Amino acid sequence: MPSKKNVPKYFTSPEEAGKFWDTHSAADYWDEMEDAEIEFDIRKHIYQIPVDEKIYQFAKAKADAEHRTVGHIINKILKSALAKAN
């Protein structure tokens, strides 16, 4: 196990988080952890749709800048565009 490093405040991708936690144990970081309340809405449906690569890259850059997920950004843009269309 490598020497203890501080947990990054933000990861740039799920892959980066995975690489960090693949080589570190959460047990070594309990003192840095905060309690969190999490709610799940199991009635929510998620649909997977193909997205053009340029749209994905645009959304990923925006998501990285805002520390959000690509899905969050694409949904935000779609909701806004659909609201304007009505």
Image (cartoon, rainbow, N blue to C red):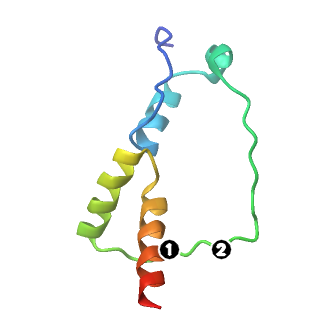
The residue indicated by pointer 1 is 48
User: Which residue is at 44% across, 33% downward?
Assistant: 19
Q: Quadrant of residue 32?
A: top right
Q: In this image, 37 relative to 64: left or right?
A: right
Disc 2 marks a residue whose amino acid type is: His
Q: Which mark is residue 38?
A: none
Under tag 1, what secondary structure? loop
User: Which residue is at 48% across, 37% downward?
Assistant: 18
- Viewer-closest of 85 and 23: 85
The x, y position of residue 29, in whole percent, is 62, 17
User: Which residue is at 47% across, 91% downward?
Assistant: 86
- Viewer-closest of 77 and 31: 77
**Number of disc labels:** 2
* Circle 1 crowding by C-alpha within 10 Å: few under 14, some 14–19, many from 20: few
Q: In this image, 27 relative to 13: left or right?
A: right
Disc 1 marks a residue whose amino acid type is: Gln
- Above or below residue 68? Residue 34 is above
Q: Residue furthest bottom?
A: 86
User: Which residue is at 29% across, 52% downward?
Assistant: 61
The residue indicated by pointer 2 is 45
Label 1 to label 2: alpha-carbon separation: 10 Å
